[in-house]
Image (cartoon, rainbow, N blue to C red):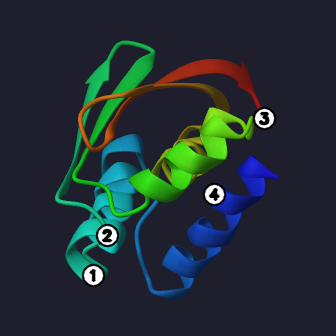
Amino acid sequence: MTRQIGRTFLEELKSKGFNFNDGEKSLESVRSYFIETHHLAGDLEYAFTGEEVDLKVKNCRFFPVCSQLENHGVLITTCPYTNTAAQAMEEATGYRFRINKEPNGFGHQIKLKKVSKV
């Protein structure tokens, strides 16, 4: 189900003409959609470190909802930014990414690690 969240957003971004030709453009498209177009967080920063991508979501509007879900045993990968970024990277690279997410203030620190060819 959580992967479907990312797929749904990815299809929306594609329909709006966002670019997924490479990892950098893919993450910039995700950032632009959530931050600039819909103002759903204060910022979404990303950095590539070898086979991993580090994402930092600041002042997330979904944070209270995701926190409640997590407190009730729903997997921590409910974050729409996380799932959309993972799907965008999969689209750009042809690899699946493992998600690791930790709370960081009123947002999250996220690591996406390349694991296997799709």
Q: Is mark 1 on a helix, strand or loop?
A: helix
Q: Residue, x 55% and y 86% (percent of image)?
A: 15
The location of residue 24, given as percent across then percent down, is 31, 45
Left or right relative to 38: residue 82: right
In the image, residue 102 sits, relative to residue 92, either above or below, namely: above
CA gap, disc 2 to disc 4?
15 Å
Q: How far apart are marks 2 and 1 (CA)?
A: 9 Å
Q: Name the residue under label 3.
A: 118
Residue receiving disc 1: 37
Q: Which amino acid does label 2 sit on?
A: Leu
Which label's residue is closer to the chain start, 4 or 3?
Answer: 4
Crowding at dot 1, Cα within 10 Å, few <14 / some 14-19 / many 20+, comes out as few
Point 43% across, 60% down: residue: 62
Quote the CA–CA distance across marks 3 and 2: 30 Å
Q: Which label belongs to residue 40?
A: 2
Secondary element at image label 2: loop
Earlier in the chain: of badge 4 and badge 1, it is 4
Dot placed on the residue nearer the N-terminal end, 2 or 4 = 4
Q: Which amino acid does label 1 sit on?
A: Thr
Which disc, if any, is residue 6?
Answer: 4
Alpha-carbon distance for marks 3 and 1? Answer: 30 Å
Tell me the quarter of the picture where residue 4 sits.
bottom right
Q: Which amino acid does label 4 sit on?
A: Gly
Point out the tag, 3 or 1, that comes first from the N-terminus: 1
Q: Do the residues labelled 2 and 4 touch (CB within 8 Å)?
A: no
